[in-house]
Image (cartoon, rainbow, N blue to C red):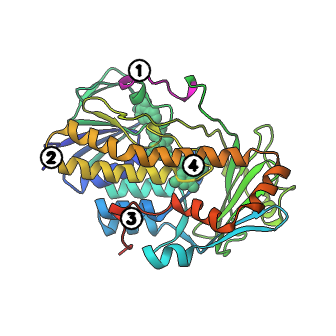
């Protein structure tokens, strides 16, 4: 049984709060230090069986259901050209629900973060408006005001520009100083009362890249689009569904994205400090699974802390287990980006020559549970 009694989690995003919800279930004292005062940046994401089943395996069915119940289920994933021509139409009911008890689903970031915080419960102390400026290998962190806190283990879940990563791995530059970090520009938003009952998640290859339309709960519809930042997209050069959803989106529900990626390194922690989620391995949204990987991280880390006496051994075992998985998915994100950024005419010729079964296989492979978490949603 682990000797870990206390954990400081830097960053109260999806990864940090998933970890908090799992650790408090094991009686570990958790302090979450979150820089922002309020609702997370960004609009919505899709969550897949790999993430929910990881939470169930390392936590319990209540946590998995709390996350799943935020969802509007998606029965199909329909990949298409802007002309309407189908590239692949994946029956998620058959491929996912029949095996795992769920498909994928769209959820707002705000509702997901609130739910994870509630699941972490009163046993977790979540402090907002607190910026960490340094993490040390012995388990101490320093806050912007000079206060120092200490725990048995520190987890940097502080996103792609991670301060924890910078201070424990000073030789590994973050995305701002890495020439090989890929950057994209995009937009997302959600509308209410339009296309609400559509049962499919649509991925559309169009004039400025790729766009998606995903149903959410309560009659809301999420959209995202790769497009330049100089003006809000209208969807006019896309299909009618994209145009209608964007036209119905009020200005305060539109968000400009600046996604970038960060190649994972092996053994991404030192001493009593490790990393989780985007801080360790930021994956391009071209595959749309970065948050699910953060939730998987949280589950693997929780189980490692429970099965090693020595906290440092637990952290190194977690990093060694996660590296091959996230590195593979990171490379998938890059490969998808190389295809998506091609000239649209060349890209469309290419994607229509790829067998639909191959597109389906590549798409599903990042969404399936790890063998150790395979099972059904109870
Ligand atoms: C356009 C887009 C679409 C996406 N779609 C999907 C999708 O459909 N499915 C999916 O699974 N993933 C998706 N992703 C990826 C997903 O958003 C990220 O992988 C996920 O948010 C990572 O969670 P995280 O907790 O690791 O980091 P973050 O969400 O970045 O959270 C980090 C937290 O740390 C806090 N913080 C930062 N620095 C400090 C500090 N010094 N002190 C204290 N707190 C700090 C931040 O305020 C933040 O709250 C998408 C990403 C983008 C950009």
Mark 2, secondary structure of its residue: loop
Q: Which mark is residue 53?
A: 3
Q: Quadrant of residue 194?
A: bottom right
Residue picked out by circle 1? 170
**Magenta residues, dominant SS class:** loop
Task: State the separation of the CA atoms marked 1 and 4.
Answer: 27 Å
Compare marks 1 and 2 and give the one earlier in the sequence. Answer: 2
Residue picked out by circle 2? 2
Task: State the separation of the CA atoms marked 1 and 2.
Answer: 29 Å
User: In this rendering, is residue 361 above or below 197?
Assistant: above
Are the residues at dot 2 and dot 3 in contact (C-beta closer than 8 Å)?
no
Q: Which residues are magenta?
A: 167-176
Q: Nearer the viewer, mark 4 or mark 2?
A: 4
User: In this rendering, is residue 143 above or below 158?
Assistant: above
Residue 54: tell me if it is visible. Answer: yes
Residue picked out by circle 4? 332
Task: State the separation of the CA atoms marked 2 and 3.
Answer: 23 Å
Q: Quadrant of residue 374?
A: bottom left
Mark 1, secondary structure of its residue: loop
Q: Is mark 4 within 8 Å of ligand 1?
A: no
Task: State the separation of the CA atoms marked 4 and 2.
Answer: 35 Å
Residue 215: tell me if it is visible. Answer: no
Residue 13 left/right relative to 77: left
Q: Is mark 1 within 8 Å of ligand 1?
A: no
Q: Which mark is residue 204?
A: none
Question: Percent from the top left, x then y, of residue 32?
Answer: 33, 41
Task: State the separation of the CA atoms marked 4 and 3.
Answer: 22 Å
């Amino acid at each position: 049984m682990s000797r870990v009694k206390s954990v400081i989690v830097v960053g109260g995003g999806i990864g940090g709060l998933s970890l908090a919800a799992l650790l408090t279930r094991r009686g570990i004292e958790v302090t979450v230090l979150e820089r922002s005062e309020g609702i997370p940046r960004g609009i919505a994401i899709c969550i897949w069986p790999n993430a929910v089943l990881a939470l169930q395996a390392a936590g319990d069915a209540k946590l998995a259901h709390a996350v799943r119940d935020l969802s509007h289920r998606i029965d199909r994933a329909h990949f298409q050209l802007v002309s309407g021509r189908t590239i692949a139409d994946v029956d998620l009911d058959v491929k996912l629900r029949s095996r795992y008890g769920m498909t994928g689903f769209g959820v707002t970031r705000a509702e997901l973060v609130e739910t994870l915080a509630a699941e972490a419960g009163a046993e977790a102390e979540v402090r907002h408006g607190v910026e960490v400026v340094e993490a040390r290998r012995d388990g101490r962190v320093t806050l912007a005001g000079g206060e120092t806190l200490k725990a048995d283990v520190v987890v940097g879940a502080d996103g792609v520009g991670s301060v924890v990563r910078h201070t424990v791995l000073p030789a590994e530059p973050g995305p701002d100083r890495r020439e090989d970090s890929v950057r994209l520009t995009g937009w997302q938003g959600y509308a209410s009362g339009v296309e609400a009952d559509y049962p499919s998640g649509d991925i559309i290859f169009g004039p400025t890249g790729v766009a998606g339309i995903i149903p959410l709960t309560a009659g809301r519809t999420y959209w995202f689009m790769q497009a330049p930042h100089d003006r809000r997209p209208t969807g006019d050069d896309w299909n009618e569904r994209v145009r209608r959803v964007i036209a119905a989106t009020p200005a305060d529900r539109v968000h400009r994205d600046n996604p970038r990626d960060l190649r994972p390194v092996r053994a991404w922690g030192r001493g009593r400090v490790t990393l989780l989620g985007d801080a360790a391995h930021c994956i391009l949204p071209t595959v749309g699974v970065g948050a699910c990987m953060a939730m998987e991280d949280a589950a693997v880390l929780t189980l490692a802390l429970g099965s090693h006496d020595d906290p440092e051994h637990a952290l190194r075992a977690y990093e060694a287990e996660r590296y091959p998985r996230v590195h593979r998915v990171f490379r998938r994100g890059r490969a998808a980006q190389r295809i998506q950024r091609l000239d649209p005419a060349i890209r469309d010729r290419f994607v229509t020559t790829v067998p639909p079964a191959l597109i389906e296989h590549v798409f599903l492979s990042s969404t399936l549970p790890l063998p150790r978490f395979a099972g059904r949603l109870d």
